[in-house]
Amino acid sequence: MTQGILYGIGVGPGDPDFITLKAVSILSQVDVVFGASSAKNSHSQAAEIVKPHLKASVPIQILPFPMTRNKQVMEAAWQDNARTVIKVLEQGKDAAFITLGDSMTYSTYGYLLKSVRKLAPHIEICSIPGITSYQAAAARINTPLVEGEESMTLLSGVLGGDKFREISDRADNVIFLKAYKNTGDIVKALDEAGMADKSVGIVRCGLEGEQIITNVNAFRERKPDYWTLIISKKSGYCVESQKKTE
């Protein structure tokens, strides 16, 4: 029997209009769609974005990916989810695994990809890029991410500002993704490097309730939002937005 193809598709940062034509083309043809959620809920923002582009009656199955740092628990979940996907592919069905942002940038799809490769190396896999949250955020505030000979550093905010502290003296432009609960320490690290006043926070970019925070010190007190990122530019920035929140 012919094996199905696994497509890993980045569907953009949240605004349904940011999904690419390539993604729409593939989604209109697949037989099954998989998405990710934490084990505590079954919601998938990505699933809401793709629904209008699917064939009638195409099932969307949300796979649990636990939010934990326990490596054994995580790897067990990756393996279980990979087996679920492989079972569908070996029935000759094409499947898409959808993820917010880009399929290859801090994406749950990356873990699934490696697990499928390990368990079923015969399966054909095709990865489709998507617009990232930080690209959308930079466009939202009309600020170039990087110019000329500058460098750009992309950091996970899971460990707060620790990673930034290691490279702050040579960082031209820094983007913190996954800032969430650690925005306070990230802002503290930026302040230590003299870059807090050259930073801007974007909350829920492209989603309902979007906010642009030009004074990042506000993050020290405000309740954290899961969809939070911070852009910091040593050369400074100029925010041009109709939704400016100090």
Image (cartoon, grey):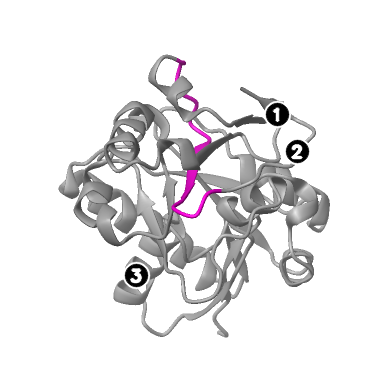
Verify whether residue 246 appears in magenta: no
Q: Please give the residue where the numbered disc 3 appears in the rendered image.
A: 114
Total labels drawn: 3
Residue at 29% over, 74% down:
118
Residue 212 horizontal/vertical position (percent)? 63, 32
Cα separation between marks 1 and 3: 41 Å
Q: Quadrant of residue 91?
A: bottom right
Which disc is residue 241 wearing? 2
Q: Nearer the viewer, residue 236 or 178?
A: 236
Is mark 2 in CB contact (under 8 Å) with mark 1?
yes
Magenta extent: 222-236
Give the residue drawn at x 63%, y 52%.
Answer: 138
Work out how far the residue at label 2 is from the one at label 1, CA to CA, in angstroms: 6 Å
Q: Secondary structure at mark 1?
A: strand
Type of amino acid under label 2: Ser
Point 53% across, 49% down: residue: 236
**Residue type, numbered disc 3:** Lys
Disc 3 versus disc 2: distance between alpha carbons? Answer: 40 Å
Decide which of 172, 26 is in the foreground and name it: 172
> Counting residues from the N terminus, which is met first, the one under dot 3 or under dot 2?
3
Left or right: residue 146 compared with residue 19 = left
- Callout 2 environment at 10 Å: few (<14), some (14 to 19), or many (20+)? few
Q: Position of residue 17 (x, y in %)?
A: 80, 52
Q: Are marks 1 and 3 in contact (CB under 8 Å)?
A: no
Q: Quadrant of the N terminus?
A: bottom right
In the drawing, what numbered circle is on residue 244? 1
Q: x, y percentage for residue 56?
A: 83, 53
